[in-house]
Image: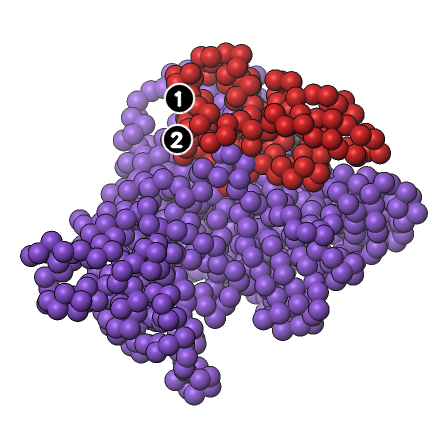
Chain colours: A purple, B red
Amino acid sequence: MAHPTVSRRDFLKVSSTAGAGLMIGVFLPVKERLIDAGLVSGQPFEPNAFLAINPDNTVAITVAKSEMGQHIRTSLPMIIADELDADWSQVKVTQADAHPDKYGSQGTGGSGSIRRSFGKLRKAGAAAREMLIEAGANEWNVDKSECAVSNGKVIHKPSGRQFTFGELTNKAASLPVPEDPPLKSPKDFKFIGKSMPGMDTRSRVNGAAKYGIDVQIPDMVYATVVRCPTFGGKVKSFNSRAAKKITGVKDIFEIEEGVAVVGTNTWAVVKGQRAADIKWNHGKFAKWNSSRIRTMMKKKGLGNAVVAREEGDVAKAQQDADNVLEMAYEVPFTSHATMEPMNCVAHVMNGKCEIWVPTQVPQRVQTTAAEALGVSEEKVTVHVTMLGGGFGRRLWADFVTDAVAISKKIGKPVLMLWTREEDMAHDFYRPTSIHKLSSAMTKKNKATSWSHRVIAPSISGQLSPERFSEGQLDRSAVNGASNVPYEIPNILVDYVMTNTEVPVGWWRSVYNSQNAFANEGFIDELAHAAGTDPYKFRLKLLKNSPRHVGVLNLAAEKTDWGKNLGKGRGRGIAVHESFGSWVAHVAEVTVNSNGNFTVDRIVGAIDCGLAVHPDGIRMQMESGIVYGLTSTLKGEITIKDGAVAQSNFHEFELLRIDEMPKVETYIVNSHEAPGGAGEPGLPPVAPAVTNAIFDATGIRIRKLPIRPEDLRV
Amino acid sequence: MAKYTLTVNGKKHRVNVEDDMPLLWVLRDELGLTGTKFGCGRGFCGTCIVHLDGEPTRSCMIAVGNANGSKITTIEGLSPDVSHPLQKAWIDEEVPQCGYCQSGQIMTAAALLEQKTNPSDKDIDVAMKMNLCRCGTYQRIRKAIHRAAKEI
Ligand code: FES
Ligand code: FES
């Protein structure tokens, strides 16, 4: 690497390898601080290679976030290419391997990829643009102000002379990085705000896209792993002779988490696993089932809670009240059920390890594998494949350990694949929860207090019990509850931790899915008690929340709120803010006399600030609506004898095309900073539907999933 | 182990595998055709659908022994250059999200269009309801099928 130029004040770095052109990366504050402190040498500097302009005129953008359907490999390049004024056909995307020093956090979650990098990526593109302009001006020996970029070319305006980016990139690479490159005015955006075609769409319609399960490398064998179905249980025995009798089975052995079967193809190992007749020591949790968990939670919910938000004096308001409305809302565990079951390809050899994996956390994969093998992280290479769905499940690297252990033992590359049954039995489930809500009411049924007790297992508590144990506040568990936006004078939100052996994890929108259901159902009850239209009731209590109001108005307007839908039909509304965006849904339902019902239509309005990739946002809204509706209508995980009772899609059902409501999505026009899109569309779905059912029938649903028998009177 | 002959995407293959091996794993593990996906292994999800002698078939549910001599079309063989009207419509409507289920969706839809050149919404429901999509692309799938039908 020759003469790297580092802009100290800024977060851009540039470097050039002789003849390889300009590479610009986004500054990594932690590394810079280390250099300032003299802890590591500052030269030469390795850039965070987000952007390279190659002499062959391609603009190579390395995307360090995982592609799981959110079109991040389209929208992140759009941001850079826009400021750079590249031609879209020049843009080539590569997927980054795990590399914390280069890319900072590669974790893909929290609907954060755009909102956390928008400014930085724009700046990287703008800096490259300014350097190319300067390089062109130098070549022509003219003033920079006479030059501009357009569609991948630098142009000398007075003479019309042109250079391609490729022709200038080596020259540009030797120039200093501008401290503060000018950013485009939004009216000049050419990609941002446009629905650019998906980078990966073509490969997703001809079978070419490579997911983890599709990796095939020379000498590779196949494996599957079974864990004890009961959480916390261990292997007791298995019949390795019977397993090895299956043609194609090469080996069967115990690994830390269960039993691994290795063979020459997937079918052999699945048969081998069945033949092995594995017996388990089920352990203590075998005595648990869903109803026992629920009883435990209810009991703990009566005890001490830790306060998350307190305003005014709820106790006094309740004392002074004419009436106190008290209700409990409940949701079950549910599973991510990505269509691609968990899998990982690992090749351990000579103290090194190479991994191909569909993951949301390449770096956690790297550290997990390094720890398992007792080697340093540099010895572990992690290639990120396409993900057949993520939704938070692939924020865990539990299945990676399986693949690494097997490859280490057999000394060959292995494709470790869980069966659907294994995937369903060993998820990190959306925490089940109980919500106790109450409100003090005046004689005229005006609400003077709001209390919400969240009773739920804690994801953080399971991850780091030393930091979060019972009696402590897990802030994430009250996400969406503690920030209830309604202006009610006395507010108390508190939390009771109820952990069990059932693994819990980040499921699309995390605790917002439960808390929004409780909030938005109960506020509807308050509206009804006050005899006020639920939409107008919300508006009255949201006087200082313009973005809530904006999406409520938009959704209401698009559905002709207030217009009668006819007999047996109902309309419900719900609003929720999460991940930096605001979403309101209006659901329309039809309920017939035997309790069967259909969700006919869901209209969603989102305010996610500046809409970088509008069609991507619409897709995420549609997807969040289906995901949310699935958990409203079906998709329940229950515990029986300490294990998950559902084994495959006949027991854990997903929404199907014939149950799909008509979905419409509207995006609020905004120039605010971008918010998230992957998750915010989910939380208001369930309450919009249950509120619509109430509108149609007068029956209030407070427990998910909704069952037809709940609607039979 | 036994030898079987399969014609996949117009090409003859001889494989030497157990007779109960589902076609899915023959395609993926033996022939390296990974466009056909595994989702459940028990006939519930449709990600593994291929055409077997023209019929949409869950390849996880049919043993290779029962497919001997058959003509099979997988997503890789639907068109040489992504020119099938459904593939074009899928691109125009930006149907895929994660994309994992889409091989199965497209193969099911292709069989539907073979039978009904202008399917109604009801026809689409009936044909497509065994194909799950966890990303929830159903509405776009419906639109894309209608769009492709117009092109045929
Ligand atoms: S894998 Fe064949 S139907 Fe699911
Ligand atoms: S596109 Fe992801 S499962 Fe259908």
* Residue B20 % position (x, y): 80, 30
Q: Is residue A148 above or below residue A575?
A: below
Badge 1 local density, few (<14 within 10 Å), some, or many (20+)? some
Q: Is residue A512 above or below residue A303?
A: above
**Residue A527 visible (yes or no):** no
Label 2 sits on residue: B93
User: Considering depth in this image, is A603 or B100 the residue closer to the camera?
Assistant: B100
* Residue A672 % position (x, y): 26, 53
**Which circle marks residue A240 in the picture?**
none
Q: Is residue A355 above or below residue A605?
A: below
Badge 2 local density, few (<14 within 10 Å), some, or many (20+)? some
User: Considering depth in this image, is A259 or A109 the residue closer to the camera?
Assistant: A259
Q: Quadrant of ligand 1?
A: top right
* Residue at far bottom of view: A38
Q: Are marks 2 and 1 in contact (CB under 8 Å)?
A: yes
Residue visible at 34% across and 78% down? A3
Q: Amino acid at mark 2?
A: Glu
Chain holding disc 1: B
Label 1 sits on residue: B147
User: Considering depth in this image, is A531 or A281 the residue closer to the camera?
Assistant: A281
Instruction: Give the mark nearer the N terminus: 2 vs 1.
Output: 2
Residue visible at 79% across and 34% down? B16
* Residue A396 % position (x, y): 60, 56
Say left or right for A457 vs A162. right
Residue visible at 68% across and 59% down? A347
Q: Are marks 2 and 1 on the same chain?
A: yes
* Residue A580 % position (x, y): 37, 53
Q: Which quadrant holds the N terminus of chain A?
A: bottom left
